[in-house]
Amino acid sequence: ADTSEHDFIVREKRNTRLCLTKKILTVNGKFPGETIYARKGDTVIVRVHNKAKYNVTIHWHGLSQPRNPWSDGPEYITQCPIQPGANFTYRLFFSEEEGTIWWHAHSGWDRATVHGAIIVHPRKGTVSPYRKPYKEIPIILGEWWKADVREVIAESIQTGAGANISDAFTINGQPGDLYPCSNQSTFTLKVKHGKTYLLRVINAAITTEFFFAIAGHRLTVVGNDASYTKPYTVDFIMITPGQTYDLLVKADSNVGGRYYIAARSYSSTVGIPFDNTTTTAVLEYAVSANTPAFPFLPDYKNTTAASQFVAGVRSLATEAHPVDVPQTIDERILITVSVNLLSCEPGRNCSGPNGDRLSASLNNISFVTPTTDLLEAYYKNTSGVFGTGFPDQPPLFFNFTGENLPGFLLFPKTATEVRVVEYNTSLEIVFQGTNLLARENHPMHLHGNSFYVVGRGFGNFDKDKDPLNYNLVDPAYKNTVGVARSGWAAIRFRAQNPGVWFMHCHLDQHMVWGMNTVFIVKNGNGPKESLLPPPPDMPPC
Ligand code: C2O
Ligand code: CU
């Protein structure tokens, strides 16, 4: 195992997109940021120097951070932010992941521009289950606002309404040929006929899931969220914010020429404006003046296409890459996932529905982010920072996805409530979407732990019938699960990573509105079963 070191200088840099130049927050002046390469077993040290005017933190999305939440990154959950002029050193232990994860800012909406890929190769002396590709390329899907993203989110918090939609989607930072002033900078992947390429696709967008495809080429999924999958050949994928897919693409077109690589929103929110534009890159055999062929992408509302794709993603489940799905569970936690309202404070003028402001909740508790570090409060036994009442009661058994939901549920309570679990508990979490205010997909992400997605469905979860149809043999192993609009998703994992782990919707608007909670996994008794001590340089609040 090796140790490598990186310096991340967080600073503003001028960038031009869509005929407009503005300053954006970057790491080392790049957008997207640089790729970190590691091998399973390695340690990576990242020294973050904050040379910007704002607080910042960095999260290593999909890295389990065994016993070391101190380096996980979500602001006020596992650390106080790194203040302007200050430094913090993240220590990353690559213990179980193999494939693609990524890093991003975890403070406000900074991750819109502060993100990059992390590629984890197999441990020295071992190989991946697929043949070594000719080349591997990160494909980062993102978004671009003409306005300053800090102002976009600040305005939405101030008005209590939804944030303005972005002005472009991007592939590797570029909007592509279909947007104004963009066709000179479209990302181009030059290929050689007969070679196989590994695309490491990351959805770093803030507001939407994507359908993604390449004209004239099929995609073979071989990994997701840094775990191997059974090879699964499709014409398009659907990827939620936070997820990654590793795709093998064979450059086997006999015609040659140029083909569009394209991504378009999959956002089935009913009645809410969304961005229906398409971002493109180009797969190029040879330069030509012809317009590239365009791939088929399902319509933005096509929930059937999305769920059919997702249903086909299975863990590899071989001797070399086994699965360890809990066949029995100690506890099932049902969590309702809702967009809600909160009343506008007196003297404030909110422009959400009925003069209220929009909010979001898990189990009808809208999470209030503490103003001091929750992990430190847990470690030092400081009271008054959080309560342990999540979920405080089983959710009321109304018809979650019916039409006439009890109106009082529109207004959740607001609190900083966490869930404490004993070491080694086998947990099942069922995320239940509701039709309370907006019917939307919710990509639910858990820090510190990957999980098996054992079941998904539409309508209300039925605790007697649905578990009979679970896949306990080769379910996908992920860190972010898409809970479909008016549907549910069930995950299972063993709580074997002592620490404080954030769980939230990876649509950042929902996160800001409170669609979050925290799981605290207690120490076990064994020598390697307890939380590591904090490093000496934890930033102060
Ligand atoms: Cu990718 Cu808590 O985030
Ligand atoms: Cu959500």
Image: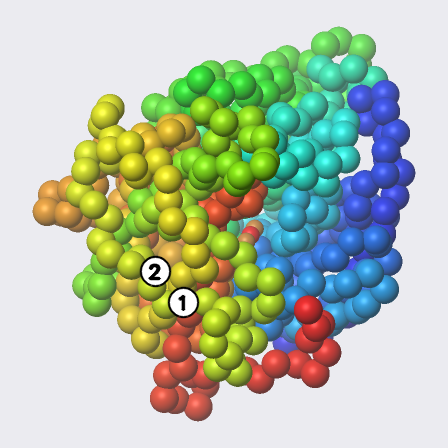
Q: Mark 2 and mark 1 in contact (Cβ < 8 Å)?
A: yes
Q: Under 8 Å from ligand 1: the CB of mark 1?
A: no
Quadrant, the C terminus:
bottom right
State the residue at coordinates (73%, 22%).
Answer: 176
Residue 186 vs residue 363: left or right? Answer: right
Indicate how the structure is coloured in the image. Answer: rainbow
Above or below for 280 versus 319 = above
Read off the residue under disc 1.
Answer: 387
State the residue at coordinates (17%, 43%).
Answer: 397
**Secondary structure under the numbered disc 1 in the rendered image:** loop
Above or below for 30 versus 62 = above
Percent x, y of residue 243: 51, 44
**Which sits in the foreground, 108 or 521?**
108
Q: Amino acid at mark 1?
A: Gly
State the residue at coordinates (40%, 53%).
Answer: 477
Q: Amino acid at mark 2?
A: Phe
**Which sits in the foreground, 375 or 111?**
375
Q: Which mark is residue 390?
A: 2
